[in-house]
Image: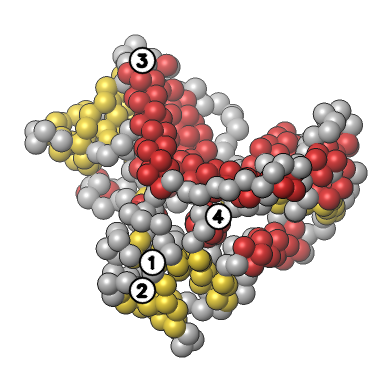
Amino acid sequence: MSGQTKRFVIIGGGPGGTTCATYAARLGAEVVLIEKDIVGGAAHLLDCIPSKAMIATGGAMSMMKRAAEMGLAKVQVELDFEALRRRIQGIETHLEDSVSSLLESQGVRLVEGVGRLTGTNSVAVDCADGSTLDLEADIIVLSTGSRPRIPEWAPIDGIRVLTTRHSYPPPELPEHLIVIGSGVTGVEFVHMFSSFGSEVTLVVSRNQVLPGKDPEVAKVLEQSFLDRGVRLVMGARAQSIETSDSQVTVRCDDGRVLTGTHVLLAIGSMPNSENLGLDEVGVESERGYVKVDHNLKSSVPNIYVAGDLSGKLPLSSVASTQGRKIAEHGMGLHAGPHRHLDYDKAASAIFTDPEIAEVGLAEVDAFAEGRKVRVTKVPFSMSAKALINNDIRGFAKIVSDPATGVVLGGSIVGRHAAELIAVIALAVTAGLTVTDLVESLFVHPALTEILGEAAE
């Protein structure tokens, strides 16, 4: 291919696909991007962004209700459901238009339709207008994302029995919402709808919410839920859902029966790998996820995978970074030694109230592995800015190597945790030490000061 323009064909226009497309185009590639639904990604623009917009509205309502504690007259607030719906649609439209404009400005050809592999270097597209388009490519990128997992016992109707895709916002504000699933998505929905005034019951299959996360983090969130009046049904797994005109009934494996007006399933996702032609061209997969190497290559060398389909961390930030890495590798920029993606150093956040964020090695994992670490924790009650904000919930925790002082990880529970974690994430990625954090001159008064204190 020396002297010739490389041809990229990308199936799926989520964060991984669009980032790959723009980077490859900037590097001189000829790029075709195929998307069937929404440019920017259904999981991103129809799940992630709307949920955070609703959470922000709920947070504003909660803050106004606490106005008297800030020296203001008490404020009466109520939810305007239709205004919220318009707000979410406006954000989605704006972001989709922005992504489309960026792609077009880079010369990326957008094709509306469904793509599938027909060979190791060829893709067929069933276009939205009913025609079929055949494309040849030097590099093929699969970034088709995922969708909510729906068990056989769940009669999803989009009215009373909902998945996340039906809930931004739902057809009506639930009077009593039963949330099945206490992972990241589930707890965000609990926070969201309890803020709006719905009665909420959370079915927790384990002995804590956020299974696998730091127990101290889970405990803070559980207490926040209880303070809001959320009912926690611990150690129970939903087995069936029955609906009537006015209510839903959820039966659990331990015999408990729960009733409400709506039920929401948040029990994970499934990769969109059907009908891609993976087996026909020899792309290896496992449980629907495509097997990839450290460069995101599949078992077919010129076919790469980005985003949820890769089976790595299902985060938009990870997908975008994967897309960039694929573009660079496909264009030959990584022929020599280079830094590979280290998924253990990816920062993540849960947008509950209080927010939760973490990065790197977790304390619970270090102890489970028998690894010696130094753990320091400082509560936000010691922060002047937290007192000023009238919100002293939570803490910052830093995990470091006791011998070298290198920062290995950390977790934050509290206001603006998703922003604050960036400091620890940078330290983890760059190999900084606790001394580097202690000697940083943070703003005063600011919430970031607590990170320096946690590093001492």
Residue 105: give its label: 3
Q: Nearer the viewer, mark 1 or mark 3?
A: 1
Amino acid under disc 3: Ser
Among the two numbered marks 1 and 3 on one chain, the one whose residue lies closer to the N terminus: 3
Q: Are marks 2 and 4 in contact (CB under 8 Å)?
A: no
| CA distance separating discs 2 and 3 | 49 Å
**Mark 3 neighbour density, 10 Å: few (under 14) some (14–19) many (20 or more):** few
| CA distance separating discs 2 and 4 | 21 Å
User: Dot 4 corresponds to which residue?
Assistant: 195
Amino acid under disc 4: Ser
Q: Nearer the viewer, mark 4 or mark 3?
A: 4
User: Dot 1 corresponds to which residue?
Assistant: 262
Q: Residue furthest top?
A: 3
Q: Nearer the viewer, mark 2 or mark 3?
A: 2
| CA distance separating discs 1 and 4 | 16 Å
**Mark 1 neighbour density, 10 Å: few (under 14) some (14–19) many (20 or more):** many
User: Dot 2 corresponds to which residue?
Assistant: 248
Q: Are marks 1 and 2 in contact (CB under 8 Å)?
A: yes
Using the rendered image of the protein, determine whether residue 259 is visible from the camera's viewpoint: yes
- At 41% from the left edge and 81% from the top edge, which residue is drawn? 251
Classify residue 27 by image quadrant.
Answer: top left
Q: Residue furthest left?
A: 131
Amino acid under disc 2: Val
Residue 199 point in image, percent of width and height: 50, 66
| CA distance separating discs 4 and 3 | 41 Å
